Amino acid sequence: MTASQEASGPQQGEQLRNPNDRPECFSSTLQECLFVLTTTMAIGQTSFFEGLVLVVSASIGEDLNMSSAEITWITAGVSLTSGAFLLAFGKVADMFGRRIMFMASMAGFTVALVIAGFANATIYMDVFSGVMGIFCASAVPPAVGSLGVVYSKPSKRKNRAFACFSAGNPLGYVGGMIISGVASEVGNWRIALWTLAVIYAIFTLLAVWTVPRDPPKAKAQLNWQSMKKLDPIGMLLAISGIALFSTALSTAGDSSKGWKTPYVILLLVLGVVLIACFLSWESIYSTPLMPLYVWKDRNFSLLMGSLCLGFMGFISKITARLLPMIINGILVNVVCGLILHKVSNKLLMLIGATAYMVAFLIMSFTPDDGIYWGWYFVPLLLMVVGADIEFNVVNMYVMSSLPSSDQSLAGGIFNTASKFCANTSLGITTAVYNSVRNQRPASPIKPYLSTYWFAAASAGLGLVLIPFLKLGTQGHENKTTSSDEETLDAPNVEAEAETKV
């Protein structure tokens, strides 16, 4: 056997390896399952915290003598900082290593929860909610990237792993509410934070065992050249632009003059200008923070648009009756994992978008004396159907649109777009609610119904985008098909990315 044959042997063996077999980086199925569960908890950090705070926000406000605006900043802070830093941390994780960043982020989030539990002043609580948002942002990209590298080839195993992973964000709110509700029954809001800290401490330890090590060649050297590749100017523009834009949306509802408040207008304008500058810079920089070529892919843009429009209407409710959402969410993700490679994903997106719109339409007709079982039970189940189906389809496609070396960045783009639209939705629905409430309507439920109408309109726009998709099945062992029987050429995607770099 020649040297060239010996060199090609492992590659041929690698090609012949059944993609449905357990990845070689795991010593057991238990380790693999715990890895998927740990990455799922990482993507759900923000949602878990926000869901937890929603239940105990009144208790926190009363204990710390907080105004309604200050209470709002507990959740707004974590959402603002996590959304602003996602893209930057995605690039950092891809260049300097995902594993250590993942573990450090999980540990940092745990410690921040513990410290926040000792808060004795308003500024203390609000600042640490922002700190937690930074750790959330730094955990998501390496978690997504690690998952994308481990399951790099289409297979049934990949479908099931991504189906579990996609449940983290939509179900995090409900999980946080349940944890908070149970913990606060036996103590107070501080116990709720510390309970969540214990849970994430356990998953931090699991990450040490389950998250695979980065290949040595995957890590860049810390030098001037690698710092230039990080696109520091793009990072600054993205972080400041998203932060200012999100701050304007978060503060408008509680400002004295609403959207007419001078500093709200200033923050909004500056945010829009900086985001525009960021996009312009990305189009000319040699190693952009967010490669704009991915948006030229029609399916990519349409899928992200439909997902974001649906997610803008995804509304959480503070009630123990949300338990059916958890059960239904688990079932929907199980089904997605089994059918993504068999059923047209265009059809699945159509089902998800329709479920969203129907759910919000039903809720928008709720009468003053409407009961939970008649007007909210079915819509809440349909919302989970819409969220989980769309997250599975879009997440799978986004992770296939960038090369394996940029998997964390792909996760950053996916989650940044979702959070950006969620923050935009929060600002719009708050404005709609306040506007209707200030008219002193005869029906006390009318302000809420107005926000449901907005959610239905948003979901409807997402539904309009679906017919333009050219998308078939995803996650097939041999190929990924589109509706016009074209096969995605993954090597060409990587080649294009390398050319851009």
Image (cartoon, helix red, strand yellow):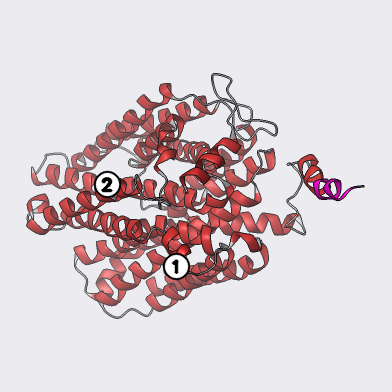
Nearest the camera: 179 or 418? 418
Up/down of 249 relative to 156, above or below: below
Question: Disc 2 or disc 1, which is closer to the eye?
Answer: 1
Nearest the camera: 114 or 307? 307
Tell me what residue is drawn at x 31 percent, y 61 percent. Answer: 236
Name the disc covering residue 224, or none: 1
Tell me what residue is drawn at x 38 percent, y 75 percent. Answer: 116
Name the disc covering residue 282, or none: none
Give the Cα distance between marks 2 and 1: 37 Å
Q: Which residues are magenta?
A: 2-9
**Residue type, label 1:** Trp
- Which sits earlier in the primary sequence, circle 2 or circle 1? 1
Assign a secondary structure to mark 1: helix
Residue 477 placement: quadrant: top right
Residue that badge 2 annotates: 424
Nearest the camera: 32 or 326? 32
Magenta-colored segment: predominant secondary structure: helix
Residue 309 placement: quadrant: top left
Left or right relative to 414: residue 68: left
Tell me what residue is drawn at x 19 percent, y 55 percent. Answer: 248
Task: Give the percent coordinates (x, y) of residue 192.
Answer: 43, 69
Q: Residues within 10 Å of mark 2 (few under 14, many from 20)?
A: some
Residue 398 lies in the magenta stretch: no
Q: Residues within 10 Å of mark 1 (few under 14, many from 20)?
A: few
**Residue type, label 2:** Thr
Up/down of 442 relative to 206, above or below: above
Q: Mark 2 touching mark 1, by CB under 8 A?
A: no
Task: Give the percent coordinates (x, y) of residue 399.
Answer: 53, 43
Q: Residue furthest right?
A: 1
Res 178 seen here: no
Left or right relative to 129: residue 320: right
